[in-house]
Amino acid sequence: MREKVLLGAIEVVKRKGVKFTMDDVAHELGMSKKTIYIAFRDKKSLLMAMADYLFDRVKESENEILNNDSLSLEQKIRMILGVLPDGYREFNFNEAYALRNKYPEIYAIVQKRIESDWDTTISLFQEGVKAGIVREIDFRVFQITFEAAVERMLMSDELDKMGIEYADALDELVSIMVDGILNK
C-alpha cells in the first residue's frame, strides 16, 4: 500500500510539482484520503519518502551504468554525472526550490543526498586518469563545483524562469564540466 501511494504521488508531482494536495493523490489513485493517511501521516512524510525513493532510484541507475560492460569509460563518466532514473527525465525538478522554505527538513535531505556518495564517481575519474582520457585535476574542486551547480538548479526558480527543464540543464552541466567551453 505504501509503495502504491508513493508511486501515485510521484505521478501527481510530475504534473503539479510539490504544490500537490493529498486530494490530488487520492484522486490519482482512486482511493480515499483516509487510506493514504494510513500509509503516510501527512504530506511532509510523503515528500520525505519521495525524496528518498528518488535518490534510491538514482543509486540503482548508477549501478546499472557501472555494471554495463558495453559502455566505454568516458560514457560511464558522462552518464554517472547526469544520471536520472528511467521515467524521471520528464519529472518537474524545477519546483524543488519550493522545498527550501516550506519543507526545510526535506530540503536538508535533498542537499545531503546531492553531496554524498561521490566515491564511485571519483574512482571512475581516477580510472580515467590512468587510462589517459581524463586529465589530472583536483576532483574535490570538481565535486564542489558540480554539487553547487546542481543544488542551485534544484533549489532556485532560475531554471523555471528561463524555461529550461532540469534534465536539459543537467545534460548541459555535464557537457560543460566534462568537455569545457573551448572548441578543440
Image (cartoon, helix red, strand yellow):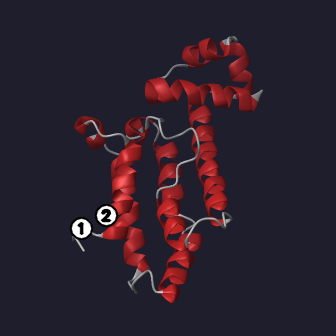
User: How would you rate the neighbour count of disc 1 (Cα within 10 Å): few for under 14, some for 14-19, many for 20 or more?
Assistant: few
Kindly identify the residue that appears in the image at 66 percent across and 31 percent down.
Answer: 6
The C terminus, quarter of image: bottom left
Residue 66, how many percent across, how many down?
Answer: 63, 66
Mark positioned earlier in the residue sequence (1 or 2): 2
User: How would you rate the neighbour count of disc 2 (Cα within 10 Å): few for under 14, some for 14-19, many for 20 or more?
Assistant: few
Residue 113, how many percent across, how many down?
Answer: 54, 56
| Location of residue 105 with respect to 80 vertically, above or below | above
Q: Name the residue type under label 1.
A: Ile
Q: Nearer the viewer, residue 29 or 67?
A: 67
Task: Give the alpha-carbon distance from disc 1 to disc 2, as whole Å.
Answer: 6 Å
For this view, does 20 lie left or right of residue 46? left
Q: Which mark is residue 176?
A: 2
Q: Name the residue type under label 2.
A: Ile
Q: Which residue is mark 1?
A: 181
Is residue 41 visible in the rendered image? The answer is: no
| Location of residue 157 with respect to 2 vertically, above or below | below
Kindly identify the residue that appears in the image at 63 percent across and 56 percent down.
Answer: 59
- The reply to whether the C-beta atoms of the residues labelled 1 and 2 are less than 8 Å apart is yes
Q: Nearer the viewer, residue 155 or 182?
A: 182
The N terminus, quarter of image: top right
| Location of residue 94 with respect to 40 vertically, above or below | below
Residue 110, how many percent across, how many down?
Answer: 50, 50
Q: Which mark is residue 113?
A: none
Kindly identify the residue that appears in the image at 61 percent across and 59 percent down.
Answer: 62
Q: SS of the residue at dot 1?
A: loop
Q: Quadrant of residue 31?
A: top right
Q: Quadrant of residue 73?
A: bottom right
Residue 131, how many percent across, how many down?
Answer: 51, 86
Q: SS of the residue at dot 2?
A: helix
Is residue 46 visible in the rendered image? The answer is: yes
